[in-house]
Image (cartoon, helix red, strand yellow):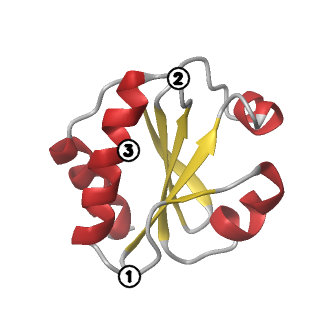
């Protein structure tokens, strides 16, 4: 499985909208300690779910149009996509258990 990867605005269509996998897209910023901690959690989740979920990072500062199009006002913000459509959102600190629960729900759509 591909590890957690960072994507840019130009890759969004292919990486998120045109995949059949459930995608967890995390808007983050390198200066945020909370985002750094979340990255470790996302790496663990990716290792636990090889091939079943795709996890992408988007640097909110470097991708302002994409951030604005999804109303990102703070980081971290997690967006859950299934079937190429936005299905859920979480803002701020989120537990590993909460993320896994959401991924399971969206995997069953």
Discs 3, 1 touching: Cβ within 8 Å: no
Q: Image height check: is 101 above or below 53?
A: above
The percent coordinates of residue 106 (x first, y second) are 37, 60
Q: How many marks?
A: 3
The percent coordinates of residue 100 (x first, y second) are 23, 54
Q: Residue at x 38, y 44 (%)?
A: 39
The percent coordinates of residue 98 (x first, y second) are 21, 42
The percent coordinates of residue 41 (x first, y second) are 27, 47
Mark in front: 3 vs 1: 3
Give SS at disc 2: loop
If you read the primary sequence from the N terminus, does the residue marked by circle 3 or circle 1 appear first? 3
State which quadrant residue 43 falls in. bottom left
The furthest residue to the left = 97
Mark in front: 2 vs 1: 2
What label sits on residue 14 in the rendered view? Answer: none
Give SS at disc 1: loop
The furthest residue to the top = 73
Discs 2, 1 touching: Cβ within 8 Å: no
Residue bearing the label numbered 1: 51
Q: Residue at x 62, y 44 (%)?
A: 58
Q: Is residue 42 left or right of residue 27?
A: left
Residue bearing the label numbered 3: 39
Q: Is residue 81 left or right of residue 66?
A: left
If you read the primary sequence from the N terminus, does the residue marked by circle 2 or circle 3 appear first? 2
Q: Are there few (<14), some (14-19), or many (20+) residues within 10 Å of tag 3? A: some
Which quadrant of the figure contains the C terminus? bottom left
């Amino acid at each position: 499985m591909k590890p957690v990867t960072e994507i840019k605005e130009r890759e969004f269509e292919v990486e998120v909208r045109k995949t059949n996998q459930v995608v967890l897209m995390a808007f983050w910023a390198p200066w945020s300690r909370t985002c750094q901690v979340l990255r470790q959690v996302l790496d663990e989740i990716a290792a636990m779910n090889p091939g079943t979920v795709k996890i992408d990072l988007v640097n909110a500062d470097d991708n302002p149009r994409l951030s604005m199009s999804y109303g990102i006002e703070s980081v971290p913000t997690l967006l859950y996509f299934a079937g190429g459509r936005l299905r859920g959102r979480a803002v701020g600190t989120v537990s590993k258990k909460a993320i896994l629960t959401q991924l399971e729900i969206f995997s069953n759509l």
